[in-house]
Image (cartoon, rainbow, N blue to C red):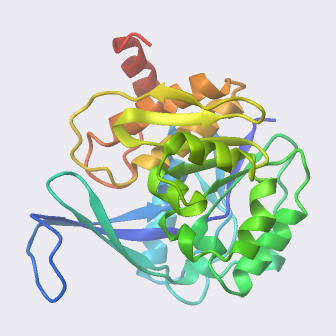
Amino acid sequence: MPVRLHHVGPVIIDVVMEVDGVPAPGGGSFASSARTLPGGGFNVVSAATRAGMEVEYAGAHGSGPNGDLVRSALRDEGVKAVHPPRPTDTGFCVVLVDPSAERTFVTHLGAEMDLPLTDLRGLRPLAGDFVYTVGYSLLPGERAEDLVTWIGGLSPDVRLVLDPAPVVGMIPDAILDRVLPRVDVLSLSAAEAATLTGTSDRMPAVTALTERVGGVVVLRIGAEGCLVAAPGSAPVHVPGFDVEAVDTNGAGDAHVGVFVAALATGEEVVPAARRANAAAALAVTRKGPATAPTAEEVEAFLQDRGR
Protein backbone atom coordinates (compact mmCIF):
# COMPACT_ATOMS: atom_id res chain seq x y z
CA MET A 1 0.00 0.00 0.00
CA PRO A 2 1.44 3.45 -0.88
CA VAL A 3 2.63 5.79 1.85
CA ARG A 4 -0.05 8.39 2.53
CA LEU A 5 -0.11 11.92 3.93
CA HIS A 6 -2.96 12.61 6.37
CA HIS A 7 -3.38 16.39 6.54
CA VAL A 8 -5.08 17.45 9.79
CA GLY A 9 -4.30 21.16 9.50
CA PRO A 10 -6.73 23.86 8.32
CA VAL A 11 -7.51 24.54 4.68
CA ILE A 12 -8.89 28.06 4.24
CA ILE A 13 -9.61 30.53 1.46
CA ASP A 14 -7.04 33.14 0.40
CA VAL A 15 -8.22 36.51 -0.90
CA VAL A 16 -5.03 37.55 -2.69
CA MET A 17 -4.53 41.22 -3.57
CA GLU A 18 -1.56 42.75 -5.38
CA VAL A 19 -0.75 46.17 -3.93
CA ASP A 20 1.89 48.85 -4.50
CA GLY A 21 2.67 48.69 -0.80
CA VAL A 22 1.10 47.58 2.46
CA PRO A 23 -0.64 50.70 3.83
CA ALA A 24 0.49 52.26 7.10
CA PRO A 25 -1.92 52.15 10.06
CA GLY A 26 -4.88 54.35 9.28
CA GLY A 27 -3.93 54.52 5.59
CA GLY A 28 -5.29 52.84 2.50
CA SER A 29 -4.23 51.33 -0.79
CA PHE A 30 -5.66 50.08 -4.08
CA ALA A 31 -5.18 46.53 -5.35
CA SER A 32 -4.23 46.04 -8.99
CA SER A 33 -5.72 42.54 -8.87
CA ALA A 34 -7.76 40.37 -6.50
CA ARG A 35 -8.38 36.63 -6.58
CA THR A 36 -10.20 34.23 -4.27
CA LEU A 37 -8.44 30.87 -4.08
CA PRO A 38 -8.06 27.89 -1.73
CA GLY A 39 -4.99 28.34 0.44
CA GLY A 40 -3.56 27.58 3.87
CA GLY A 41 -3.21 23.82 4.20
CA PHE A 42 -4.41 23.34 0.62
CA ASN A 43 -1.00 24.50 -0.56
CA VAL A 44 0.66 21.55 1.20
CA VAL A 45 -2.05 19.13 0.04
CA SER A 46 -1.65 20.15 -3.60
CA ALA A 47 2.16 20.20 -3.44
CA ALA A 48 2.38 16.66 -2.07
CA THR A 49 -0.29 15.39 -4.47
CA ARG A 50 1.40 16.91 -7.52
CA ALA A 51 4.66 15.36 -6.35
CA GLY A 52 2.99 11.96 -6.63
CA MET A 53 1.97 11.28 -3.03
CA GLU A 54 -1.42 9.94 -1.96
CA VAL A 55 -3.06 12.54 0.30
CA GLU A 56 -6.25 12.73 2.30
CA TYR A 57 -7.60 15.88 3.86
CA ALA A 58 -8.51 14.93 7.42
CA GLY A 59 -9.05 18.48 8.66
CA ALA A 60 -12.35 20.29 9.16
CA HIS A 61 -14.22 22.31 6.53
CA GLY A 62 -17.35 24.46 6.47
CA SER A 63 -20.76 24.28 4.85
CA GLY A 64 -20.88 27.76 3.25
CA PRO A 65 -19.46 29.11 -0.02
CA ASN A 66 -15.88 29.04 1.26
CA GLY A 67 -16.27 25.40 2.24
CA ASP A 68 -17.74 24.62 -1.18
CA LEU A 69 -14.70 26.18 -2.83
CA VAL A 70 -12.36 24.13 -0.62
CA ARG A 71 -14.10 20.84 -1.44
CA SER A 72 -14.15 21.64 -5.16
CA ALA A 73 -10.41 22.34 -5.13
CA LEU A 74 -9.70 19.13 -3.22
CA ARG A 75 -11.74 17.11 -5.74
CA ASP A 76 -9.81 18.71 -8.60
CA GLU A 77 -6.56 17.49 -6.99
CA GLY A 78 -8.02 14.01 -6.44
CA VAL A 79 -7.94 14.41 -2.65
CA LYS A 80 -10.61 12.95 -0.37
CA ALA A 81 -12.13 15.07 2.41
CA VAL A 82 -12.56 12.61 5.28
CA HIS A 83 -15.01 14.48 7.52
CA PRO A 84 -18.46 15.93 6.69
CA PRO A 85 -18.88 19.73 6.54
CA ARG A 86 -19.32 21.70 9.76
CA PRO A 87 -22.43 23.91 10.13
CA THR A 88 -20.39 27.15 9.89
CA ASP A 89 -18.30 28.32 6.94
CA THR A 90 -14.57 27.89 6.33
CA GLY A 91 -12.41 30.87 7.29
CA PHE A 92 -10.37 33.08 5.00
CA CYS A 93 -7.13 35.03 4.81
CA VAL A 94 -6.54 38.40 3.13
CA VAL A 95 -3.11 38.23 1.49
CA LEU A 96 -1.40 41.46 0.40
CA VAL A 97 1.40 40.89 -2.12
CA ASP A 98 3.73 43.86 -2.65
CA PRO A 99 6.06 44.55 -5.62
CA SER A 100 8.95 42.69 -3.92
CA ALA A 101 6.72 39.54 -3.94
CA GLU A 102 6.57 39.63 -0.12
CA ARG A 103 3.19 38.83 1.39
CA THR A 104 1.29 40.08 4.45
CA PHE A 105 -1.54 38.06 6.03
CA VAL A 106 -4.71 38.91 7.94
CA THR A 107 -6.68 35.76 8.84
CA HIS A 108 -10.25 35.15 10.01
CA LEU A 109 -10.60 31.59 11.33
CA GLY A 110 -13.73 29.51 10.84
CA ALA A 111 -15.01 25.93 10.65
CA GLU A 112 -11.56 24.55 9.81
CA MET A 113 -10.59 24.95 13.48
CA ASP A 114 -13.36 22.62 14.68
CA LEU A 115 -11.66 19.21 14.72
CA PRO A 116 -12.62 17.31 17.90
CA LEU A 117 -10.86 14.30 19.34
CA THR A 118 -13.72 12.01 18.30
CA ASP A 119 -13.05 12.81 14.63
CA LEU A 120 -9.31 12.47 15.01
CA ARG A 121 -9.68 9.05 16.58
CA GLY A 122 -11.57 7.91 13.51
CA LEU A 123 -8.44 8.32 11.38
CA ARG A 124 -6.32 5.29 10.59
CA PRO A 125 -2.76 6.26 9.59
CA LEU A 126 -0.67 3.16 8.93
CA ALA A 127 2.95 2.43 9.72
CA GLY A 128 5.15 4.60 7.49
CA ASP A 129 2.40 7.14 6.78
CA PHE A 130 2.85 10.86 7.47
CA VAL A 131 0.55 13.10 9.50
CA TYR A 132 0.84 16.83 8.83
CA THR A 133 -0.28 19.64 11.08
CA VAL A 134 0.46 23.34 11.47
CA GLY A 135 0.88 25.88 14.24
CA TYR A 136 -2.59 27.36 13.76
CA SER A 137 -4.05 24.07 15.02
CA LEU A 138 -1.99 24.37 18.22
CA LEU A 139 -3.25 27.80 19.25
CA PRO A 140 -4.77 27.88 22.75
CA GLY A 141 -8.15 26.18 23.02
CA GLU A 142 -9.99 22.92 23.43
CA ARG A 143 -9.23 21.71 19.91
CA ALA A 144 -5.50 22.16 20.39
CA GLU A 145 -5.68 19.95 23.46
CA ASP A 146 -7.63 17.38 21.43
CA LEU A 147 -5.00 17.40 18.68
CA VAL A 148 -2.08 17.10 21.12
CA THR A 149 -3.80 14.21 22.90
CA TRP A 150 -4.31 12.42 19.58
CA ILE A 151 -0.71 13.06 18.50
CA GLY A 152 0.48 11.55 21.77
CA GLY A 153 -1.38 8.35 20.94
CA LEU A 154 -0.03 7.93 17.40
CA SER A 155 1.95 4.79 16.68
CA PRO A 156 5.73 5.42 16.68
CA ASP A 157 5.74 4.11 13.10
CA VAL A 158 3.56 7.04 11.94
CA ARG A 159 5.68 10.06 11.03
CA LEU A 160 4.56 13.50 12.26
CA VAL A 161 5.26 16.66 10.23
CA LEU A 162 4.87 20.10 11.82
CA ASP A 163 5.10 23.56 10.27
CA PRO A 164 4.77 25.96 13.25
CA ALA A 165 3.74 28.88 10.97
CA PRO A 166 4.05 32.61 11.78
CA VAL A 167 1.82 32.12 14.85
CA VAL A 168 4.50 30.03 16.60
CA GLY A 169 5.02 32.76 19.20
CA MET A 170 1.37 32.40 20.24
CA ILE A 171 1.58 28.64 20.89
CA PRO A 172 1.94 27.90 24.62
CA ASP A 173 5.30 26.45 25.65
CA ALA A 174 3.48 23.61 27.41
CA ILE A 175 1.96 22.56 24.06
CA LEU A 176 5.27 22.78 22.20
CA ASP A 177 7.03 20.80 24.91
CA ARG A 178 4.54 17.97 24.39
CA VAL A 179 4.54 18.02 20.59
CA LEU A 180 8.10 18.78 19.47
CA PRO A 181 9.72 15.57 20.85
CA ARG A 182 7.21 13.58 18.77
CA VAL A 183 7.90 15.49 15.53
CA ASP A 184 9.69 13.56 12.78
CA VAL A 185 9.94 16.54 10.37
CA LEU A 186 9.94 20.15 11.58
CA SER A 187 9.82 22.56 8.62
CA LEU A 188 9.90 26.27 9.40
CA SER A 189 11.09 29.69 8.25
CA ALA A 190 14.10 31.54 9.63
CA ALA A 191 11.79 34.00 11.42
CA GLU A 192 9.88 31.16 13.05
CA ALA A 193 13.13 29.48 14.11
CA ALA A 194 14.27 32.75 15.70
CA THR A 195 11.01 32.96 17.65
CA LEU A 196 11.39 29.38 18.89
CA THR A 197 15.06 29.64 19.83
CA GLY A 198 15.61 33.30 20.65
CA THR A 199 18.43 33.66 18.11
CA SER A 200 18.44 34.88 14.51
CA ASP A 201 21.77 33.12 13.91
CA ARG A 202 20.63 30.23 11.75
CA MET A 203 23.16 27.52 12.55
CA PRO A 204 22.79 27.83 16.34
CA ALA A 205 19.00 27.97 15.84
CA VAL A 206 18.97 24.71 13.89
CA THR A 207 21.25 23.07 16.43
CA ALA A 208 19.00 24.19 19.28
CA LEU A 209 15.93 22.86 17.51
CA THR A 210 17.49 19.44 16.95
CA GLU A 211 17.75 19.16 20.72
CA ARG A 212 13.97 19.64 21.06
CA VAL A 213 12.72 17.73 18.00
CA GLY A 214 12.63 13.97 17.64
CA GLY A 215 13.53 13.98 13.93
CA VAL A 216 14.71 16.15 11.03
CA VAL A 217 14.76 19.96 11.17
CA VAL A 218 14.35 21.88 7.89
CA LEU A 219 14.97 25.62 8.20
CA ARG A 220 13.79 27.35 5.03
CA ILE A 221 15.78 30.44 4.02
CA GLY A 222 14.06 31.55 0.83
CA ALA A 223 16.23 31.94 -2.24
CA GLU A 224 19.22 30.67 -0.25
CA GLY A 225 17.59 27.25 0.03
CA CYS A 226 17.43 25.56 3.42
CA LEU A 227 19.40 24.13 6.30
CA VAL A 228 18.68 20.52 7.23
CA ALA A 229 19.78 18.63 10.30
CA ALA A 230 19.05 15.00 11.04
CA PRO A 231 19.34 13.64 14.59
CA GLY A 232 22.96 13.32 15.65
CA SER A 233 24.37 15.15 12.61
CA ALA A 234 25.58 18.67 11.91
CA PRO A 235 23.35 21.05 9.92
CA VAL A 236 23.85 20.99 6.14
CA HIS A 237 23.16 23.94 3.84
CA VAL A 238 21.29 22.84 0.72
CA PRO A 239 21.56 25.77 -1.76
CA GLY A 240 18.50 27.25 -3.42
CA PHE A 241 17.98 28.39 -7.00
CA ASP A 242 18.15 31.84 -8.54
CA VAL A 243 14.77 32.70 -10.11
CA GLU A 244 12.73 35.85 -10.63
CA ALA A 245 10.07 35.75 -7.90
CA VAL A 246 6.65 37.26 -8.54
CA ASP A 247 4.74 35.88 -5.53
CA THR A 248 6.21 34.13 -2.48
CA ASN A 249 2.79 33.16 -1.10
CA GLY A 250 2.70 29.38 -0.59
CA ALA A 251 6.41 28.79 -1.28
CA GLY A 252 7.07 27.34 2.16
CA ASP A 253 4.06 25.05 1.79
CA ALA A 254 5.31 23.85 -1.60
CA HIS A 255 8.67 23.15 0.04
CA VAL A 256 7.32 21.03 2.89
CA GLY A 257 4.82 19.17 0.67
CA VAL A 258 7.46 18.15 -1.85
CA PHE A 259 10.01 17.37 0.88
CA VAL A 260 7.60 14.94 2.55
CA ALA A 261 6.63 13.38 -0.78
CA ALA A 262 10.32 12.77 -1.53
CA LEU A 263 10.86 11.17 1.90
CA ALA A 264 7.84 8.95 1.23
CA THR A 265 9.63 7.47 -1.78
CA GLY A 266 12.67 6.61 0.36
CA GLU A 267 14.81 9.57 -0.71
CA GLU A 268 17.47 10.74 1.76
CA VAL A 269 17.13 14.07 3.56
CA VAL A 270 19.56 16.18 1.50
CA PRO A 271 18.31 15.08 -1.97
CA ALA A 272 14.74 15.55 -0.70
CA ALA A 273 15.63 19.08 0.42
CA ARG A 274 17.18 19.83 -2.98
CA ARG A 275 13.97 18.69 -4.67
CA ALA A 276 11.93 20.82 -2.25
CA ASN A 277 14.12 23.85 -3.00
CA ALA A 278 13.44 23.37 -6.70
CA ALA A 279 9.70 23.13 -6.11
CA ALA A 280 9.70 26.32 -4.02
CA ALA A 281 11.75 28.12 -6.67
CA LEU A 282 9.23 27.19 -9.35
CA ALA A 283 6.32 28.13 -7.09
CA VAL A 284 7.51 31.72 -6.56
CA THR A 285 7.63 32.31 -10.33
CA ARG A 286 3.83 31.86 -10.44
CA LYS A 287 1.11 34.02 -8.94
CA GLY A 288 -1.16 32.50 -6.34
CA PRO A 289 -0.89 30.41 -3.17
CA ALA A 290 -1.22 26.86 -4.54
CA THR A 291 1.42 27.07 -7.28
CA ALA A 292 3.46 23.96 -6.50
CA PRO A 293 4.82 22.25 -9.63
CA THR A 294 4.31 18.65 -10.72
CA ALA A 295 6.95 15.99 -10.19
CA GLU A 296 7.79 16.16 -13.90
CA GLU A 297 8.30 19.94 -13.72
CA VAL A 298 10.61 19.61 -10.74
CA GLU A 299 12.63 16.88 -12.44
CA ALA A 300 13.01 18.97 -15.62
CA PHE A 301 14.04 22.01 -13.56
CA LEU A 302 16.70 20.03 -11.69
CA GLN A 303 18.09 18.55 -14.88
CA ASP A 304 18.20 22.01 -16.47
CA ARG A 305 20.11 23.33 -13.45
CA GLY A 306 22.49 20.37 -13.50
CA ARG A 307 21.56 19.00 -10.06
Left or right? Give the position of 13 relative to 148: left
| Residue 11 position (above or below residue 261) | below
From the top left corner, tell me how far across and down residue 46 is, in percent: 50, 48
Residue that appears at 35% across and 15% down: 305
Give the quadrant of the C terminus.
top left
Residue 195 seen by the camera:
yes
Left or right? Give the position of 89 relative to 297: right
- Rendering quarter of residue 26: bottom left
Decide which of 184, 130 is in the foreground and name it: 184
Decide which of 154, 170 is in the foreground and name it: 170
- Rendering quarter of residue 66: bottom left
Left or right? Give the position of 58 relative to 294: right
Give the quadrant of the N terminus.
top right
Residue that appears at 56% across and 77% down: 170
| Residue 7 position (above or below residue 93) | above
From the top left corner, tell me how far across and down residue 55 is, in percent: 64, 48
- Rendering quarter of residue 298: top left
| Residue 142 position (above or below residue 205) | below
From the top left corner, tell me how far across and down residue 257 is, in percent: 55, 44
Residue 122 seen by the camera:
no
Residue that appears at 67% across and 32% down: 263
From the top left corner, tell me how far across and down residue 71 is, in percent: 51, 66
| Residue 74 position (above or below residue 94) | above
